[in-house]
Each structure stands twice: as structure tokens, then as C-alpha cells.
Image (spheres, grey):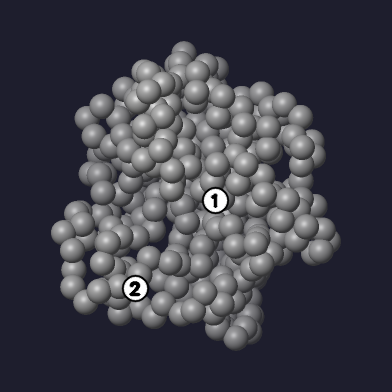
Amino acid sequence: MRGTARRRLLRRSASPIGERNADIHVSYWASTTQSFDDIRSAAQWAAEAGWRGAWLPDHFMRSADNENGPGPTDAEMNPMLEGWVTLGALAASVPALRLGLMVGGNTYRHPGVVANMALTLDHISGGRAVLGLGAGWQTNDHQRLGIELPSVKVRSDMLEEAAALCRAVFAAGGQRVDFAGEHYTLTQIPVHPAPVNGMIPIMIGGAGHQRTLRTVARSADEWNAWGRPDTIAEHLEVLRGHCEAEGRSFDDLHLTAVGLLILVDDTETSATLRESLAHRSGLIGTVDELKAVIEEYRAVGVDELIVPDFAIAGPGKLDVLQRFQDEVLA
């Protein structure tokens, strides 16, 4: 079965961080090292299967082991599509799915330009755009393109300003906006077109307890991070505290987590993979093990799981996704 009858809304048990919605969604995150045809076909599959969104990374080359060194590496030479342009193509060719970057590197572009790009995507897609924002981190992206990579503190300041600026732009639909910050300025910028649905959701990615999660509480509608369920639970407790300090309802936030998908048939293989990929949170294991870890994410309060195809990209990707759908999510 496909379409709305297969929409991924998994029942949630009571959460220790407080009652939230009873359902958990699933979305697809495509590697942009694939061809556009491969990305589009998987996004179309996700739309037909009733998944909630399609996400793309925002990088210009693969991260390199020697990214702090002077020379390029072979890994950087793998083809990589640009995220925003690819989102526009998906918006025009794939229905239903929410569309966004997971997440956009704030250091790469002026947020006033980004806000306009998001508004354009929103209209191409008929109101399905989500603006993903992060502080920016990948060293070789910045080095090779001559883009400054400031200190963590400065990047945190810039992200906080950028999120506030974009929210002001989206909220001003049809009017002009002024914004005066330490890093960014807008002077009577016209906001046309206005968001299709009155506002474009802002998702902030990252889990820095002091700054990033405070920015989420101040300016975001949604939050995303990598992490095992117990780690996500720790982040959410901190985020709840920031929401209380900012006078904002924690329950208004849409909470998402990333889980790398690797589906295997025996527990010995899954144990080996989990050990070798201990640095990555993931949906790694047998069907029963994946069902259990999804239950753990649900129990700590996650509203949506973002499933990247990084470990399954290739000719058999759709078969793996279909098996995940039929055997794990059913």
C-alpha cells in the first residue's frame, strides 16, 4: 500500500520529557554525491510511501581527512550537486514532501539572500519549504572556496542573528524589513513574495548546549541533531530549560533526530557495525533491533526521524528503503 494509507505516523508512548504528539514521522535525506535522477527517484518513492520530507546536505565537496592541510584529497573529487538548486528541481518534480537543507551552512551566504531563496523555493513547491540553518563547520568547504571560518563563538553569534533575521523577513510578508545586527544588515528590503502559508518553518541543526539550543528556543520552529536516544534526551532537557528561560513553549517545537540506516539480517553483523560506527547514531541492525531503537527515539520525545541514504546509496537503495518501510515501519 502507498499514499496516505502508508503515511509514516508511528504511535508514541508517554515521554519522560512531557506529553507530545502521539505520532512520529519519517523523512528521507539524500546524499548529493548521487545523480539527480537517483535523488529524484528516491524522493518520489518517499512521497508515494507517505514519508514527510526530503532533505539535502549543504556542502560543496566531501569532508577530507586532511582538511586542515594544504592540499586537496581524492575524497574531495567525488561529484557533488549543490543543495539549493537541487531542492528547486525536486520542488518542481516531486509532490507532497517538505523540502529543505539538512542544514544550510550559515557562513556560506548572507541570510538575507538565503531568506529570499527559501521564499522562492516555497512558491515553487506550493508552500513546502523548510529553512534549515546551522553555524557551519566543514573546514575544507571554507578553505577551498576562500570563505572565512570564524571561531565557534563568532559563528554562534552569526547563527543567532541569521535566524532572527530570517524570521523577521518571513513574518513581514508583503512589507519591507529593516534589520541591524553586528554581522548582518537589511535596509528596507521588500519581502515579495510572502510565504505561501504565512510563515516558513525554521529548523536549526546542532546540539551546543549553551548557544545553539538557546538559539533554537529563541528563533526556531524545529530542531535537528545526530545522536542516540539517550543523548537526544539529554539535549532535550537542556532545550526545555532554554525554552523556559525565553518564555517559549517547549511543546511548540518540532523535534527531529538523524539515524543512519543499515539493515542487516543477523545480530552478529549488526553488533560489529554498531561498534565500528559508534561515532554515528543510527538505525543499524536487524528488523527487530531497528523497531526497538525507533521506540527509544519515540519514548524520549522525537517527533520525526530523518533517514539518510549515505550507507545505502547505489543500485539497491530503493530495495533497502522498501524493506525498511515494509518490515520495520509497518
* 120 or 62, nearer to the observer: 62
* Residue 253 drawn above or below residue 210: above
* 126 or 128, nearer to the observer: 128
Could you say where residue 158 lies in the image, as x and y percent from the top left? Answer: 55, 76
The residue pinned by badge 2 equals 142
Q: Residue 277 vs residue 167: left or right?
A: left
- Dot 2: few (<14), some (14–19), or many (≥20) neighbours within 10 Å? some
Could you say where residue 301 lies in the image, as x and y percent from the top left? Answer: 68, 38
Report whether residue 242 is seen.
Answer: yes
Q: CA distance from mark 2 to mark 1?
A: 22 Å
- Dot 1: few (<14), some (14–19), or many (≥20) neighbours within 10 Å? many
The residue pinned by badge 1 equals 225
* Residue 221 drawn above or below residue 145: above
* 207 or 177, nearer to the observer: 207
Task: Mark 2 or mark 1: name the one nearer the start of the chain.
Answer: 2
* Residue 320 drawn above or below residue 281: above
Q: Residue 220 vs residue 261: left or right?
A: right
